[in-house]
Image (cartoon, grey):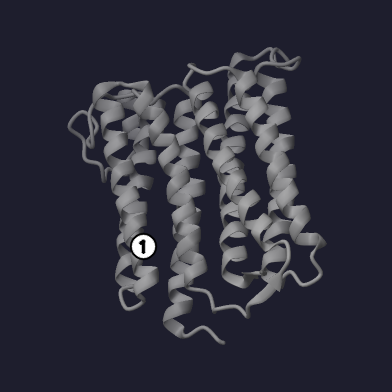
Amino acid sequence: MNLTSSHKTLRLLTWFTLAVTVILTTGLGGAVTSAEVGMAYPTWPNINGWSLFNFFYQDIAEQFGIGASLEHTHRQAGTLLGLLSIALVALSWRRPHTRRLALWNLGLVIIQGGLGAFRVLDNAQIIGILHALGAQAVVVCLVAVLKSCQPTPSLVRLNAAPRIHLWSLIGIALLFVNLLAAASLRHKSGAFSGHLLLALLASGVLLFSIRLILLQEKSPKVLRADAKRLLVTLGLQLGLGIGTWAFILGPLALEFNSEQTRFLVQNFLATAHLVVGMIVMAMASAVFLESKRSTQWTG
């Protein structure tokens, strides 16, 4: 079945919203946390009286510091995400299932904005950690929106379907727990050992799910493609994790004599690790949802 023009537009808008969530909102948020400038200015949503829609970043940096400019850009990205989420609801209004998912996404984005506000106004780290987890929930919801506006696939009967559903779901749950550990570590209140253990567990479970899919000759093409993309993303995340550890906690922590260069490298690696982690969550969600969409349980 071919996608209609409105469905194609909805898919493109969902892809764009997902990209904004992962690259801009989360990427900038990760950079803010890594640079420890989340409290660059203690007001919300304005900047000590300056408008949220002020795009003179140089002026903001000169008056309040580069951290304030970075935090301000993160808030603007969050505002863009909110506007895109409203557009998703409007565009999906005539598709009941997609509309429900889009409304859930909008609700999560609103909650995210509230958590961001309380994080600043109360200067509470626990709210910052919840704010980081909320971004993952938005990603999962957006992937669900994306899957719901794809053509309905032909159903395939797979003996391994129950195990694929179960293990991919367990993998997603472990990712959320691991992201809680990672967020705690980034906010200086967690242990690296816990994050490492959970990362290995989550990766092992997801790799097992991928193996189940790829070993099934009748696995749908879209499901196999999602599984392969998840495999590649997991490999990239592993490499970034090793690099981040090496330059922040490991033998390369003092590799650069310049403190500024060391800070930039560490910030870049930590933020890239976070962003790719979001993509892993998106890919794992795609595998789970596609397995539910395109397979039937035997029995």
Relative to 152, residue 243 above or below: above
Residue 124: image location, x then y, percent: 32, 21
Quadrant the N terminus occupies:
bottom right
What amino acid is at disc 1? Answer: Ala
Query: For residue 286, which quarter of the picture?
Result: bottom right
Q: Residue at x 75, y 43 (%)?
A: 235
Residue 199: image location, x then y, percent: 65, 33
Residues 234 and 159: in front is 159
Quadrant the C terminus occupies:
bottom right
Residue 60: image location, x then y, percent: 32, 32
Tell whether 59 sits left or right of 145: left
Residues 13 and 149: in front is 149
Residue that protrudes farthest toward the left in the picture: 49
Q: Residue at x 31, y 28 (%)?
A: 119
Numbered marks: total: 1
**SS state under label 1:** helix
Q: Residue at x 44, y 35 (%)?
A: 132
Tell whether 29 sits left or right of 93: right
Residue 224: image location, x then y, percent: 73, 64
Relative to 72, residue 123 above or below: above
Q: Residues within 10 Å of mark 1 (few under 14, many from 20)?
A: many
Q: Which residue is mark 1?
A: 102
Q: Residue at x 32, y 35 (%)?
A: 116
Tell whether 160 sits left or right of 34: right
